[in-house]
Amino acid sequence: MGKIHPKFNKELPANWKSYFDPEFDNEFKREHKVAYRIYTVVGICALFIPVFLCIFLSVFIGKDIENPWALLGFLGAFIFGVGLFNIVSAFIGQYLGHKVTIVCLTAGFAIPFIVLLWLL
């Protein structure tokens, strides 16, 4: 069993579409059964915690939670979660590149921030 090291690449890899194939990470699963489960749980948490945080802030801080713009904030938080998930994915060799991460983290932070300011 080899050591696990994150693999960060600057550009979007040529085989990025294969990352979405359920069979793609079978070799990693076979070699690192426990680590794969841990990375899966951490990745799912990274994906959804920003959305739950945005919902929490919208409900407890925002005055107009029924405003349709709140949905845009939740979508932005999900995009931020995609950026975090992409970082976790580097440990299983499925990182989508710096540009995807930066765009997701930047847009995913800015959209809910602006929406939450609007709702205040």
Image: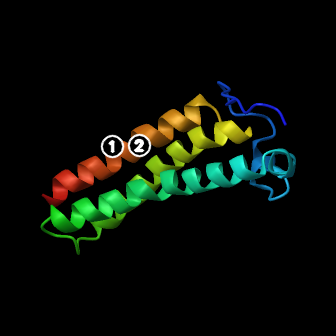
On screen, residue 74 versus residue 25, left or right, reads left
CA neighbours of label 2 inside 10 A, class few (<14), some (14 to 19), many (20+): some
In this picture, is 9 found above or below 110?
above
On screen, residue 113 versus residue 108, left or right, reads left
Q: Amino acid at mark 2?
A: Ala
Whether residue 94 appears in this view of the structure is no
Q: Are marks 2 and 1 in contact (CB under 8 Å)?
A: yes
On screen, residue 11 versus residue 115, left or right, reads right
Q: Which residue is mark 1?
A: 110
Where residue 19 sits: x, y (%)?
76, 48
Where residue 117 sits: x, y (%)?
18, 51
The label number, if any, that marks residue 55 in the structure image:
none
User: Which of the image's four quarters has the N terminus?
Assistant: top right
The label number, if any, that marks residue 107 in the structure image:
2
User: Which of the image's four quarters has the C terminus?
Assistant: bottom left
Where residue 56 sits: x, y (%)?
27, 63
Give 96 or 43, whichever is nearer the viewer: 43
Q: Amino acid at mark 1?
A: Ala
Q: Residue at x 31, y 58 (%)?
A: 54
Give 97 or 72, whichever is nearer the viewer: 97
Give 112 or 30, whichever is nearer the viewer: 30
